[in-house]
Amino acid sequence: MNFELSEEQELLRRTVRDFALTRVAPLAAELDRESRFPYELVAEMAELGLMGIPIPEEYGGAGADTVSYAIAVEELTRIDSSVAITVAAHTSLGTMPIYLYGTEAQKQEWLPRLASGEALAAFGLTEANAGSDAGATRTRAELHDGAWIVNGSKMFITNAGTDITACVTITALTGESEVSNIIVPNGIPGYDISAPMHKLGWRASDTRELSFRDCAVPEGNLLGERGQGFRQFLEILDGGRISVAAMGVGLAQGAYDLALAYAKERHQFGKPIAEFQAVQFALADMATEIDAGRVLVHRAAWLKDQGKDFALAAAQAKLYTGLLSNRVVNAALQIHGGYGFMDEFAISRLYRDQKILEIGEGTNEVQRMVIAKLLGL
């Protein structure tokens, strides 16, 4: 086993780390406070090639591996989760379905703009009454005169309503017990997007409710084979869990960084609190668990890159890092004491941003169900 990053991976890590520190960090608190989407940062990330890291160069991407993608997502989350989820949702959920299941014509139509970061994409799976039970979708698409007539709604959809969003791929019933995926372009009649939703965390990320009323989508926008939507979105979620697991590691690392720096600066009883064993033990536990979580993420990403079965590893990494980030950010805020409860300190933002990592891309409970099934139970 070789745990060293390649030269290319290390260069990417340093590049993203530098961008996160110099460009994202100065704006993160303001974006969060104003619930403002980071358009300027997305444009800069596009210039750096970060909006299509695992997409082949022939379609406008960087052509890098999944491990590299996980590294980039971790480094962004280390500073700000809203920026990181914008990249992760666009890549894993918005762009990847078109790359994996699209016809060559669909790839040529959509991928160059998406992989280059010129435009964003979203994935519409969740509905008001279809969350963990994603197969309970009620959105319908009926084929009439060369068009899919879509009726229904989607909830909690990331990146769907920005000024640069090009499309959303939705799951819909195309038959009584038949689920298919359909690419819906933004701006098409009958497709309405709500105002941004107010959230506990990820406040600078775009989250919307989508509504479809007799929305006519060209028949050619069917993604992959009709009736294969359920299988497709399960595969998409498997891959997406790697990026969300990387976010868990990144948020935990960011919280640890803040706690370590604060413990060295904060004096009580005549010395830095970093000299007290209780604080040292908390930091030691954090560092140990973060390293373990990172190995789980990189293993899942490596398995995917090798073309091996990675579903179990991805679910395990996602479960573990969600729980890990919860423990670490809570301990990190505790080290900050009363100051950690103040919005002036970044740890309070990380604390709010963490919880969704145990809900999105499958709750902790769903991850355990997936893991148990894959263990043959």
Image (cartoon, grey):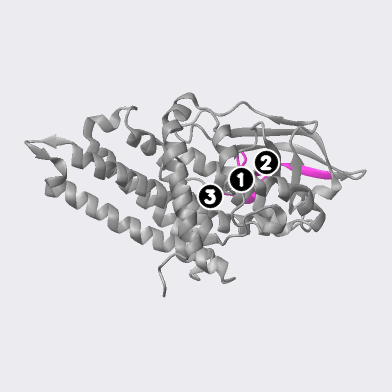
Q: Which stretch is magenta?
A: 121-142
Percent across and percent down for residue 147 are 87, 43
Q: CA distance from mark 2 to mark 1?
A: 12 Å
Residue in the image at 28% along x and 55% along y: 287
Query: Which residue lies under the disc numbered 2?
Result: 118
Query: Which of 171 and 178 lies nearest the eye of the viewer?
Result: 171
Mark 3 residue element: loop
Image side of residue 74 versus residue 135, left or right: left
Q: CA distance from mark 3 to mark 2?
A: 25 Å
Among numbered discs 3 and 1, the one appearing first in the sequence: 1
Residue 313, x across and y down, in percent: 48, 65
Alpha-carbon neighbours of circle 2 within 10 Å: few (<14), some, or many (≥20)?
Answer: some
Tag 1 residue: 90
Q: Amino acid at mark 1?
A: His
Q: Secondary structure at mark 1?
A: helix
**176 or 255: nearer the viewer:** 255
Q: Amino acid at mark 3?
A: Glu
Q: Nearer the viewer, residue 330 or 234?
A: 330
Mark 3, residue position: 361
Q: With respect to residue 150, does 369 lie above or below?
A: below
71 w.r.t. 122: above or below: below
Between marks 3 and 2 in the image, the one whose residue lies nearer the viewer: 2
Give coordinates of residue 118: x percent, y percent: 67, 41
Report helix, strand or loop for mark 2: loop
Q: Does label 3 or label 2 sit earlier along the sequence?
A: 2
Which label sits in the foreground, 3 or 1? 1
Q: Residue at x 46, y 37 (%)?
A: 24
Task: Farthest residue to the bottom: give it.
Answer: 1
Query: In the image, what residue type sits under mark 2?
Result: Glu
Locate residue 340 relative to residue 239 in the image: left or right: left
**Does the residue at mark 3 contact the one at mark 1 (Cβ under 8 Å)?**
no
